[in-house]
Amino acid sequence: FIDRWDRWMSMELRERPDEGKLNSRVWRFIVKGGIFGDQPCAGAWRMSEDRVGRRYPFAIVRLGPPPEPGDPWYDAVASLLQNCVDNSWAQTRLAESLQILPPPGAAAATDKIAFWSDDWEVREFGFADIHDLAQNALPAMRGTAGDGGVLSHG
């Protein structure tokens, strides 16, 4: 999982500038098996930066059957991400918070690739396969100014 995820996200790091305000939007996701590894995965990610200002994508990921998109687990994970980045949580605090995170509910269909955000505007993107994801996902998530409606791709 980590090698494929890092390779995909490295494309994003090349395209995002290291200056200006840090984008605080959290993207929740479900990705079918065969994309980042044999198993499906679910979680959330957002941009973060280290103490010297280098930016990187920070993610909390769960391998295995993903929860339904409306499961409160996604909001809990997004809240952890926001707190870690905005309040400079130490790794120990994150680890403790992950230990008490309520488990997700029923499993969702595992045959899709979907990313969505509802931090201040609802955005949703779906992708057909790994090629569509590789070519279109990160640029779509980076350029999400608009009317606040639901977007779909692929």
Image: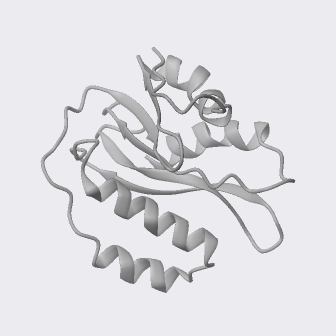
Question: Which residue corresponds to the image point at 51% horizontal and 52% vertical from the top-left?
Answer: 45
Image-based side of 121 in relation to 60, left or right: right
Question: Which residue corresponds to the image point at 79% horizontal and 56% vertical from the top-left?
Answer: 21
The quadrant where residue 9 appears: top right
In the rendered view, tell whether residue 49 sits above or below residue 47: below
Is residue 35 visible in the rendered image? The answer is: no
- The x and y percentages for residue 22 are 74, 56
Is residue 122 visible in the rendered image? The answer is: yes
- The x and y percentages for residue 77 are 39, 61
- The x and y percentages for residue 64 are 24, 47
In the rendered view, tell whether residue 53 sits above or below residue 14: below
In the rendered view, tell whether residue 59 sits above or below residue 13: below
In the rendered view, tell whether residue 1 sits above or below residue 31: below
- The x and y percentages for residue 102 are 23, 69
Image-based side of 56 in relation to 117, left or right: right
Image-based side of 131 in relation to 144, left or right: left
Image-based side of 39 in relation to 49, left or right: left
| Number of numbered labels in the structure image | 0
